[in-house]
Amino acid sequence: MGSSQAAVSFLTNIARAAFSLGVGATVLNSSLYTVDGGQRAVLFDRFRGVIDETVGEGTHFLVPWLQKPYIFDIRTRPHTFSSVSGTKDLQMVNLTLRVLSRPEVNRLPDIFKTLGLEYDEKVLPSIGNEVLKAVVAQFNADQLLTERPHVSALVRESLIRRAKDFNIVLDDVAITHLSYGAEFSRAVEQKQVAQQEAERSKFVVAKAEQERRAAIIRAEGESESAKLISDATAAAGMGLIELRRIEASRENTSTMSKNPNVMYLPNGNNMLLGLNTGR
């Protein structure tokens, strides 16, 4: 009987110790929190509110129930958003903007108070559209292509300055896509066709002018040649023309003599063809 009571007492003590150890481990676990690399924490105290100190990486203590940590990712993250903006000449342009953003570490308590954990999703799309519309409205549609580096620089400067008001740092801002509306694209295509037609017309005019000059030069050459022949004829008589006629006849005779299909007959009536003298 005594041994049974001792065993029950021993087991009871073990259960109490295990319970106490479990409660202690639970309290200890709830009193610790870990901040990973590339993160920072902001503590909320039920009595003092948001504490104005940012907690760095590592494992830290807090008062259970009284304090609660909120973890921020402070690494640079990409964000992409699109905007439809009007140009100075009233053309609609589709723009896509990509930014690399991160929060100001020392201002995390203020960011948590005013914007919360999703600060970038709340701020960047709105200020991005605002800046894009303001900058694009300063340029004509064609200038967005010809002066794209200048446009990108203005967007970058304006957006960095605007994001700084919300304690957000922008490491990079870039326009990744730019396209025009259907009407402007059609107008650009028609302009290109008109320019090609104009260039073709210029080529036709230049060709006609060159042909006219060639005809004038050819006529002047023939006139000069005729004049020289006339002067030579006047100086030497008809002998030069007779010499040219003889040379031309000799050339024709030489050419025809080499042709087997040509037969030559002597002049006069004394030639007999196919005559049989035996009869």
Image (cartoon, rainbow, N blue to C red):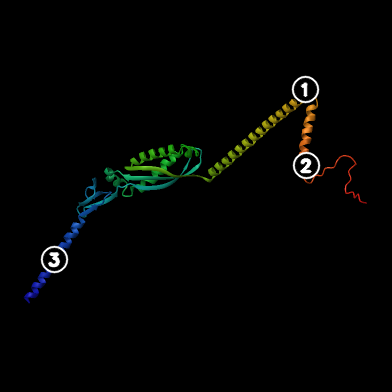
Task: For marks 3 and 2, give the CA distance.
Answer: 140 Å
Quick one: label 1, few (<14), some, or many (20+) residues within 10 Å?
few
Kind of residue at badge 1: Ala
**Relative horizontal placement of residue 266, taking residue 154 as reference (left or right):** right
Kind of residue at badge 3: Arg
Furthest residue in direction top, as rendered: 235
Furthest residue in direction front, as rendered: 278
Q: Quadrant of residue 30?
A: bottom left
- Of residues 80 and 64, the one nearer the viewer is 80
- Of residues 131 and 37, the one nearer the viewer is 37
Please tell me whether mark 2 sits on a helix, a strand or a loop.
helix
Mark in front: 1 vs 2: 2
Answer above or below: position of 231 versus 27.
above
Mark in front: 3 vs 2: 2
Q: Earlier in the sequence, mark 3 or mark 1?
A: 3
Furthest residue in direction bottom, as rendered: 1
Q: For residue 235, which numbered disc appears in the image?
A: 1
Please tell me whether mark 3 sits on a helix, a strand or a loop.
helix
- Where does the image place residue 60, in percent across and percent down from the top left? 20, 51
Answer above or below: position of 266 versus 13.
above
Task: For marks 1 and 2, give the CA distance.
Answer: 36 Å
Residue on which the image places disc 3: 16
Quick one: label 2, few (<14), some, or many (20+) residues within 10 Å?
few
Residue on which the image places disc 2: 257
- Where does the image place residue 55, in percent across and percent down from the top left? 23, 47
